Amino acid sequence: MLKVFKDLLCRGGDAGSKAQQYTSEKELQIATCALLLEMAHADDEFSPEEEQRIASLMNNHFNIAPGVFSEIKALSDQRRAESIDLWHFAKMIKENYGPAEKEKVIEMVWSVVYADGRLDAHEDYLVHQLARILDLEHRQLIDAKVRVLRQAKAHGA
C-alpha cells in the first residue's frame, strides 16, 4: 500500500497509466467543460453565445445529448466553484489525452474565446497557460487559433 501511495506522489512507475485507466469518460467531459466554462468567464462576461458555443462543442466532441450536456455543465460549474485553479482539470486532460486530442481541446477553448468576436487579454493569458500545462507547443496553440479564426471567417462570424 505504501508503494502505491509513493508511486502516486512521485508519478512514477505504473501510477500514471493506472490513473488513466480509471478516469471515466464522464470525468473527462466534466474536466473539458470546466475549462471551457472558465474561459467563457475569464473576461467577466458569460454571454448566451458562449454558453451555446460550449453546448455545441461538447455535444459535437463527445457526441452527447443536449439533456446530458445540462448535467455535465452543472457538475462542471460545481467543480469549478470548489476548485482554486484550472490545474486539476488540465492535468486530467493531459494525462488521458494524446497530442491530437489535447490540441482539439485547445481549439475548443479558442472557439469559446472567440464566441463573442474578441480576445480579452486575460483570456489570451489563460489559454497560453493552459497550453503550457497540456505540454502543447506554441505552434500547436497558434495552429488551433488559426483554424478557429478561419472557420469563423468562413461562416461569416
Image (spheres, helix red, strand yellow):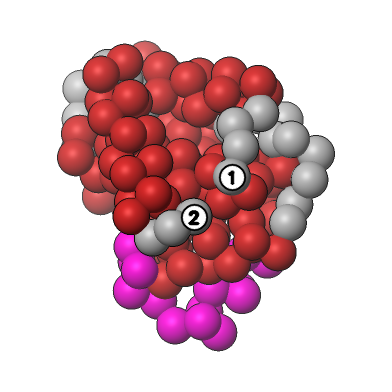
Q: Looking at the picture, tell me which residue is in the foreground, 78 or 99.
A: 99
85 relative position to 23: left or right: right
| Magenta residue check for 84 | no
Amino acid under disc 2? Ala
In the image, residue 115 sits, relative to residue 59, either above or below, namely: above
- Could one spot residue 103 in this view of the protein? yes
In the image, residue 71 sits, relative to residue 61, either above or below, namely: below
Task: Please tell me which of labels 1 and 2 falls first in the chain.
Answer: 1
92 relative position to 50: left or right: left
- Could one spot residue 148 in this view of the protein? no
Q: Residue furthest right?
A: 44
How many labels, in total?
Answer: 2
Residue under the point 44% across and 58% down: 156
* Label annotation for residue 157: 2
Residue under the point 74% across and 35% down: 43
Q: Looking at the picture, tell me which residue is in the foreground, 112 or 30.
A: 112
Residue 119 x/y as whole percent: 60, 31
| Magenta residue check for 64 | yes
Helix, strand or loop at disc 2? loop
Amino acid under disc 1? Gly
Res 80 quadrant in image? top right
* Magenta segment boundaries in residue numbering: 60-74
Residue under the point 65% across and 21% down: 121
127 relative position to 59: left or right: right
Whether label 1 touches label 2, CB < 8 Å = yes
* Label annotation for residue 65: none
Residue 73 x/y as whole percent: 62, 64
Residue at image mark 1: 117
Q: Residue furthest front?
A: 156
In the image, residue 134 sits, relative to residue 45, either above or below, namely: above
